[in-house]
Image (spheres, rainbow, N blue to C red):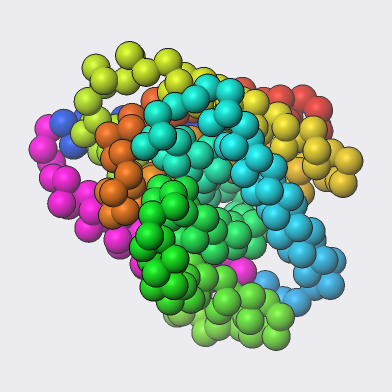
């Protein structure tokens, strides 16, 4: 059942790939669709998934998931530093490699895969788990890309307002308020949020497919560090996450959410941030392409391993 659901996601990705190659939509259209997803459909999905009556156990579990997320991001930071020490990429590329190890593709692939494996219930916890991502990607992420340039501190100060106004942060704030106070939204609003949120999965996979279609595949094969990066990003890091968090919980959902999100490919916004802050955009795009392509095999593998140990 799980493999069938994941296979459907990758069929949607193929649809996006073919549609982009056939010029059904352009690169600018893809940016517009990404903006629609991040600003409209994903927030709707998050709010809809958090439309639950307050439950003390659910509240405790959400704090537990947030704690797990902080542990995982701390570990990922040290793994990223270790990668630079061991494999010595060029100085101008070090930040991009570190970014690609720390930040996974939660929005475009993480949420759809969580929903496919664990059902809509997992989106509540996934949104909580992803809070550190939204806080770190515009601070630590920019620091990785820019390094110790003179204007880095200025840029970080400017970006703090983006953090507060990020649609995902606002959506989690609204959703958690609804949960804490057991607010019941009117039926038409709930249904509208459900319909909009339902667009997130197909739209995100089509966007990822379109992104893959725009990448120059030939440039990837000569960079051996990318293959090491993908091995760490898709296999080693989720296994480390699993190994650490199993000492805190044996619950499949509580353990599975961090492991599956850790197994996602490189964050889709790696190339966007690299472009905006003078990083190696080509390297970021290649990392996104290769890790996403390889994840077609590694994500089902990770889901299968979880199902074996926690039936």
The percent position of residue 7, horizontal first and vertical second, equals 47, 29
Q: Is residue 80 above or below residue 187?
A: above
Quadrant including the N terminus: top right
Tell me, yes or no, whether the highlighted magenta stretch contains residue 187: no
Residue shown at 38% from the left, 54% from the top: 149
| Closer to us: 97 or 47 | 97
Residue shown at 76% from the left, 43% from the top: 255
Residue most toward the left? 23
Magenta span dominant secondary structure? helix
| Closer to us: 309 or 101 | 101
Left or right of 310? Residue 95 is left
- Counting labels gives 0
Residue shown at 72% from the left, 37% from the top: 241
The percent position of residue 4, horizontal first and vertical second, equals 53, 29
Q: Is residue 214 above or below residue 118?
A: above
Residue shown at 71% from the left, 60% from the top: 66
Left or right of 211? Residue 190 is right
The percent position of residue 117, horizontal first and vertical second, equals 61, 40
Q: Which residues are magenta?
A: 22-50
- Is residue 37 something that shows in the picture? yes
Q: Is residue 234 above or below residue 72?
A: above
Residue most toward the front? 150
């Amino acid at each position: 059942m799980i493999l069938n659901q994941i296979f459907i996601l990758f069929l949607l990705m193929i649809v996006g790939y073919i549609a982009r190659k056939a010029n059904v939509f352009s690169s600018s259209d893809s940016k517009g669709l990404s903006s629609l997803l991040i600003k409209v459909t994903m927030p709707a999905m998050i709010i809809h998934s958090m439309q639950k009556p307050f439950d003390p156990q659910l509240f405790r579990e959400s704090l537990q998931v947030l704690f797990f997320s902080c542990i995982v991001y701390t570990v990922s930071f040290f793994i990223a530093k270790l990668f630079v020490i061991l494999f010595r990429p060029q100085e101008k590329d070090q930040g991009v490699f570190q970014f690609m190890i720390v930040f996974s593709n939660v929005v475009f692939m993480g949420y759809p895969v969580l929903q496919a494996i664990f059902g809509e219930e997992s989106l509540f916890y996934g949104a909580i788990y992803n809070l550190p991502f939204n806080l770190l990607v515009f601070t630590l992420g920019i620091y990785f890309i820019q390094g110790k340039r003179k204007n880095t501190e200025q840029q970080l100060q400017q970006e703090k307002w983006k953090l507060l106004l990020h649609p995902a942060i606002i959506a989690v704030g609204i959703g958690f308020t609804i949960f804490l106070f057991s607010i019941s939204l009117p039926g038409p609003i709930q249904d509208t949020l459900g319909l909009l949120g339902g667009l997130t999965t197909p739209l995100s996979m089509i966007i990822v497919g379109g992104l893959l279609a725009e990448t120059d595949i030939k440039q990837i094969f000569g960079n051996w560090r990318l293959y090491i990066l993908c091995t760490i990003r898709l296999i080693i890091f989720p296994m480390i996450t699993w190994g650490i968090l199993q000492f805190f919980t044996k619950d499949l959902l509580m353990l599975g959410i961090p492991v599956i999100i850790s197994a996602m490919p490189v964050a889709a916004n790696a190339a966007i941030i690299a472009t905006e802050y003078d990083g190696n955009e080509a390297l970021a795009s290649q990392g996104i392409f290769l890790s996403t392509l390889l994840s077609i095999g590694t994500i089902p593998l990770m889901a299968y391993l979880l199902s074996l140990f926690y039936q």
